[in-house]
Structure formats: structure tokens, C-alpha cells
Amino acid sequence: MRDFFIENFSDYSRVIIFLHVISAALLIGSMFMMRFVIHPVQKEVSDIKIRFESCMKMVQHYMLFSLPMMFVIILTSVFMHIGLGFRGGNPITNVMVHTKEALWTFIAFNMIYMYLKYRRAKKGLADENYIEVEENVVLIVKYLIPLNLLLAAISAYFGVILRGF
């Protein structure tokens, strides 16, 4: 199995790195857009039902967009980790790689938690319990997405260090 990753990475290293970088950029950009561009505009909608319905649609589309990006990042990370041979290299580099893995694992679990909060907010919207909807949406947009944004930016910085640029 290890030979599969090493061989494919050596054959398609530029494509794998490109997919990794572009997926990370799209994921970080989508988090930035959700928190700092779309959410402030969304708060200006006066009708609470319309505001929450459109907000729930935005969160749903964000989740559907983020899932494939995270999958590509994880898949290309495995190829790069094994293909570049970080295990047998410099111990500091190995620590950075494992730190990036830990950050992305936390981001993935945070995304799962966001999905559970989204489902709870969706149930509250169906029951017209707007207090529950607002609590869950505020948690997602004001706290969980910015946390993921910060962790993803740190991970991207570590990626730049690892590539030696």
C-alpha cells in the first residue's frame, strides 16, 4: 500500500499538490465569506422567519461545499505525507506534519459538531422555535466557523513552512 502512494505521488506530485492547495484555499475562503461577508448582510433581514430560512439554506450549502474540499485535503495529505517520506526525515518536520494532522482532525470534528447544530436548528425552524434556531446558528457562524478559519490558516502556514517557501 505504501508503494502505491509513493509511486502515484512521484507520478502526479504537481497535480496532488495543486489539488491540495486549491482545496485549502477554497475552504478557507468559504469560511471567510460565511463569517465576514454573508453573515453581516444576513443580519439586516428584518423578517425573522425569512432570515432564518435563508440562513439555514446558506449553512446547508456551506456544509455541502465544505465536505468535498475536506475530503480532497485529507486524501492529498495522505499522498504527500507518505510520498514525501516525512516519517523518516527531520524530527521537527515530522512534528509539524503531525500538528497539521491534529489541526485538521479537530477541524473535521468541529465540522461534524456544526452539522449536528445545523440539524438541531433545522428542527427548531420546522417547529418555529426561533430561539433554538438563533442559538444554534449564532454558535455556528460566530464561533465555530471562525475557529475553523483560524485553525485552517495556521495549518496553511505550517504547509508553507513544510514546502520550504
Image (cartoon, rainbow, N blue to C red):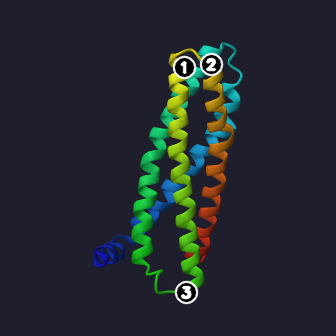
Q: Which residue is mark 3?
A: 90
Q: Residue at x 54, y 79 (%)?
A: 94
Q: Is residue 110 shown above or below 117?
A: below
Compute the Cα span from label 2 to label 1. 6 Å
- Tell me the crowding category of disc 1: few under 14, some 14 to 19, or many 20 or more residues within 10 angstroms, Cα based: some
Question: Considering the numbered disc 1 on the image, is that residue within a helix, a strand or a loop?
Answer: helix
| Quadrant of the rendered image containing residue 34 | top right
Q: Residue at x 42, y 56 (%)?
A: 72
Image x and y of residue 143, in percent: 68, 42
Tell me the kind of residue under disc 1. Answer: Leu
Q: Is residue 151 shown above or below 46?
A: below
Question: Considering the numbered disc 3 on the image, is that residue within a helix, a strand or a loop?
Answer: loop
* Quadrant of the snapshot with the N terminus: bottom left
Q: Residue at x 55, y 35 (%)?
A: 117
Q: Is residue 19 at least partly visible in the picture? A: no
Direction from residue 39 to residue 12 in the image, left or right = left
Question: Closer to the N terminus: mark 3 or mark 1?
Answer: 3
Tell me the kind of residue under disc 3. Answer: Asn
Question: Closer to the N terminus: mark 3 or mark 2?
Answer: 3
